[in-house]
Image (tube, rainbow, N blue to C red):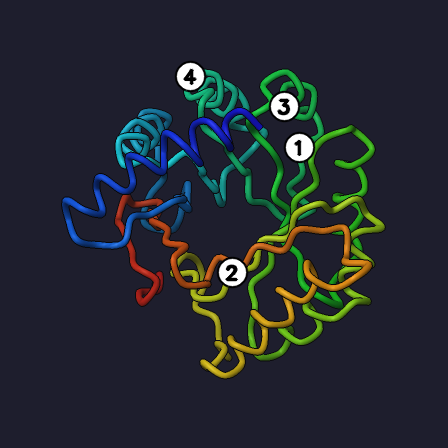
Amino acid sequence: LLNIFLYHAIQGEKRREEWQEKLDLPAASFMVVEAQNRQGTLTYQDLDNLMTQGKDLGIYFYFLRDLDLKARQREIILLASKHNDCIFYLWISGACLDRGLAAYMKKLGNVHFLVEIQPGEELEDLDALAWIWSQGLPVTAAIHLDKKNYKEVAEGDFLDLLIQRGVQFLCCFQDLPLGAKLEGGLDPQEKIWLRKKLADLDSREGAKKILVVDYDRGGLEGLFVTGSGDLLSRQEGAD
């Protein structure tokens, strides 16, 4: 909580406003890093440099994708310890959950699992969420929204299923330029409908006990870094 309110919301926001005024461009508030792809792998030094440069831009939220948790457990611990003013989300599938890392995560307090899910998929990812909850760790899920799933995600049954597994936060991504290109992106009208539905979750009486964050909404900008060190915009996709 200290990292969220002091560094991200106060110190980071001030720094982001300075850069926005200086460059006359929207300032990024989070960074999604693809730790490795077919073109390359980011080393510990690469990641450390990204965090250092990111904090200079006012970024204290980092999503780390495609990171081999077991092979690079020591690097994750070192990174989270050195940059203990940042918040790290290890973006994984349920099959890649490293249960041995959980004890360290409790001590560090600033690194969390982010389990990618899709409606109707195998229960392995849902079981991973339940296990994280059983360890007393924050439970966060991520989902790529497209034409096939966006209505189901915004309806009650799917969210109830996540809440039963202890999910407290659901991160929704649409135009994510990393990884395989997704088909069936939402058109403007569908995005408006989705945002209204998500807003209703928080405003109506008896609201769902889950915070849904739409990372595609206006004003929430991010930086996207590939495993080869390239910086991408939302309009670009990985090969």
Q: Pick whichever of labels 4 and 2 is earlier in the sequence.
A: 4
Res 173 label: 2
Given this view, does label 1 or label 3 mark the residue nearer the observer? 3
**Mark 2: amino acid:** Phe
Residue at mark 4: 82
Residue at mark 3: 105
Q: Looking at the image, do the residues carrying marks 4 and 3 touch, with CB atoms under 8 Å apart?
A: no
| Residue 144 percent coordinates (x, y) | 56, 63
As measured in the structure, the alpha-carbon distance from the residue carrying label 4 to the one carrying label 2 is 28 Å
Mark 1 nearby-residue class (10 Å; few <14, some 14–19, many ≥20): some
| Residue 99 percent coordinates (x, y) | 71, 30
Mark 2 nearby-residue class (10 Å; few <14, some 14–19, many ≥20): some
Q: Pick whichever of labels 2 and 3 is earlier in the sequence.
A: 3
As measured in the structure, the alpha-carbon distance from the residue carrying label 1 to the one carrying label 4 is 21 Å
Q: Is 40 drawn above or below residue 212 in the view shown?
A: above
Q: Is 32 drawn above or below residue 112 in the view shown?
A: below
Q: Secondary structure at mark 4?
A: helix
| Residue 119 percent coordinates (x, y) | 72, 66
Q: Secondary structure at mark 3?
A: helix
Q: Pick whichever of labels 4 and 3 is earlier in the sequence.
A: 4
